[in-house]
Image: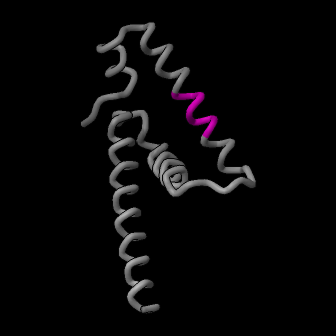
């Protein structure tokens, strides 16, 4: 079971909403694609967004966009907590 993104957006915003949302979504995904292949240093949030969107790209048509952003926020929270714990452990070892 599941709904499609297009049906959700069409029910909420109509045909104009579909055009606008997917144009912005396409620009967003293109920006992620360009960021993946640059030599610049990326933030941990950017890596998480790229990873989640790549991992969930096959199920994107049957899921909601908010599900993907929920996964991004959950992974970011876990990463921040992990980095905090690792840094606090390093500080204990040094002292």
Task: Look at 42% across and 92% down and name the residue there.
Answer: 95
- Left or right, 34 with reference to 47: right
- Left or right, 86 with reference to 30: left
Provide residue 49's location: percent of width, then percent of height.
49, 48
Return the residue nearer the eye: 51 or 84: 84
Provide residue 38's location: percent of width, then percent of height.
73, 50
Image quadrant occupied by the N terminus: top left
Task: Look at 75% across and 55% down and name the residue there.
Answer: 39
Provide residue 60's location: percent of width, then percent of height.
43, 38
Provide residue 34's location: percent of width, then percent of height.
69, 42
In magenta, the rendered stretch is: 25-31
Return the residue nearer the eye: 5 or 25: 25
Spot the residue most to the left: 1
56 in relation to 16, above or below? below
Task: Tell me, yes or no, whether the highlighted magenta stretch contains residue 34.
Answer: no
Task: Look at 38% across and 88% down and name the residue there.
Answer: 92
Return the residue nearer the eye: 31 or 83: 83
Task: Tell me, yes or no, whether the highlighted magenta stretch contains residue 28.
Answer: yes
The chief SS type of the magenta part is: helix
Task: Look at 35% across and 57% down and name the residue there.
Answer: 77
40 in relation to 31, above or below? below
22 in relation to 29, above or below? above
Render colour scheme: one colour
How many dots with numbers?
Answer: 0
């Amino acid at each position: 079971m599941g709904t499609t993104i297009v049906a959700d957006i069409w029910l909420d915003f109509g045909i104009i909403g579909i055009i606008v949302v997917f144009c912005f979504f396409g620009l967003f995904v293109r920006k992620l694609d360009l960021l993946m292949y640059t030599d610049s240093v990326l933030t941990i949030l950017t890596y998480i967004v790229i990873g989640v969107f790549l991992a969930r790209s096959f199920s994107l048509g049957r899921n909601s966009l908010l599900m993907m952003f929920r996964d991004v926020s959950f992974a970011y929270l876990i990463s921040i907590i992990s980095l905090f714990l690792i840094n606090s452990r390093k500080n204990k070892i040094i002292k």
